[in-house]
Amino acid sequence: GIDIMISLDTSGSMSIKDFLKQSRIEGAKNILENFIDKRKGDRIGLVTFADSSFLKCPATINYNLLKSIINKLKNEK
């Protein structure tokens, strides 16, 4: 497998509903979940950013944990 780090914008602009009648953040979360479901044996991590950046999940093969963290993300104001 390979190592992949996802960088996701969680700023207020991601609350705009211009992505198939859903917010940008919800659209991104759906795309990420589909992407993760297609990976096999790759370590994937997640960094979010708005005013500051945060490591939300170090690189892991625990895809259920990663998707759980992604599902709980909200926009940072």
Image: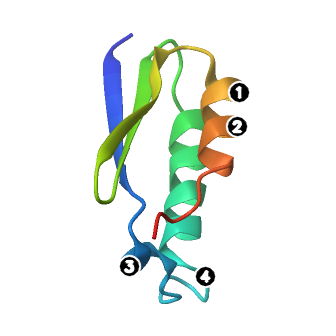
**Residue at image coords 42%, 26%:** 45
Residue 22 circle label? 4
Compared with residue 67, is residue 33 higher up or lower down, i.e. above or below?
below
Mark with earlier residue (1, 4): 4
Q: CA distance from mark 3 to mark 1?
A: 27 Å
Decide if residue 25 is on the left or right side of residue 51. right
The three-letter amino acid code for the residue at tag 2 is: Ser
Identify the residue position indicated by label 2 in the image. 68
Q: Is residue 24 above or below residue 43?
A: below
Relative vertical location of residue 13 with respect to residue 34 in this rendering, above or below: below
Image mark for residue 64? 1
The label on residue 13 is 3
Q: Amino acid at mark 3?
A: Ser
User: Mark 3 or 4, which is nearer the eye?
Assistant: 3
Tag 1: residue type?
Asn
Residue at image point 58% right, 60% down: 74
Mark 2 secondary-structure assignment: helix
